[in-house]
Amino acid sequence: MLATIRYILLTAFRDRFLAAILLALLAAVAGALFFGSSALTEQSALGLAFAGELVRLIAVVGLVTFICFHLRRLYETREVEAILARPISRSAFVLACFTAYAAIAVLLALLTVPMLMAALKARGAGLAEWEASLALEGLIVVGLALFSAMTLESATASVLAALGLYLLGRSAAAFRAIAENGTGSLDSDMANTAVRWVMEAIAAVVPRLDLFGQSRWLVYGPGGGWGLRELAVQAVIYLPLLLLAAIRDLQVKRF
């Protein structure tokens, strides 16, 4: 298991993934600094808010793309068969993959802090809460990407599926608002009721990813709405489900 973790981490360095995403994060922070400086008022707040969203987007897309394409390459080159031929169970292989990818996600969350501190003067408990929530969100994204890559035969399809699930999580608040207020877009009351139930079901099932990495923490500090405790509970609930689904899919595969 340790050998698999080390192999995945070395692959991330060898393929220049960490260097590329670090460069993208630096470009995002620099762009946010330039964008904030163009504002007439609240330049620092605007730059921090913009940087928070850009960094979050780059980290999510980068993680999903790397995980999905890396795992599909392992399947296509039959490296998975070679790994499983050693004394390692399929469940241990999935857990090793998750551990390695999770370490990369946490590392990305840690790397963004000195950038925001140096370029945009981010400080205090708000920055710490934002960083912790970004790391928790990264773990859930790793679980989504791992599950998609294990279940789908195409790297592109798995990337799109993982990003689609992530988008559902980001839109959970909008779905709940639609369910509570009604759509009013259909002539039939029965159809409107069915749509509201569907929206309510989606909002109840998907994780509330829109509550992670809130930019207002960078600007105003912690407080208001859900905190780290509620976000950690979400991670505790959804991560085991995603890992169990990925393990189950790998166990039924025949090589």
Image: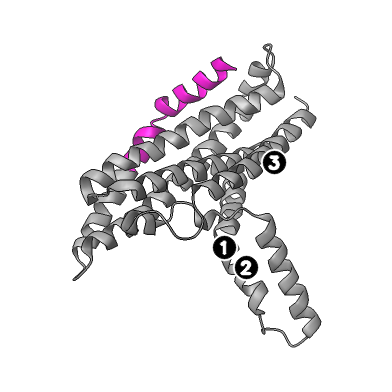
Quadrant in which the N terminus is drawn:
top right
| Relative to 109, 28 lies left or right | left
| Relative to 50, 238 lies left or right | right
SS majority, magenta: helix
Q: Label 2's element?
A: helix
Residue beneath disc 2: 175
Q: Residue at x 57, y 68 (%)?
A: 174
Q: Residue 140 at x, y = what percent?
A: 56, 43
First in sequence, mark 3 or 1: give its number: 1
Question: What is the crowding at mark 1: few (fewer than 14 residues within 10 Å), some, or many (at least 20)?
Answer: some
Q: Which residue is drawn at 76% across and 77% down?
A: 193
Which of the pair 60/84 is nearer the observer? 60
The relative height of residue 104 versus residue 45 in the rendered view (above or below) is above
| Numbered tag placed on residue 241 in the rendering | 3
Which of the pair 104/74 is nearer the observer? 104
Give the amino acid at mark 1. Ser
Residue beneath disc 1: 171
Q: Label 3's element?
A: helix
Specify start and end residues of the magenta stretch as a single range: 1-24
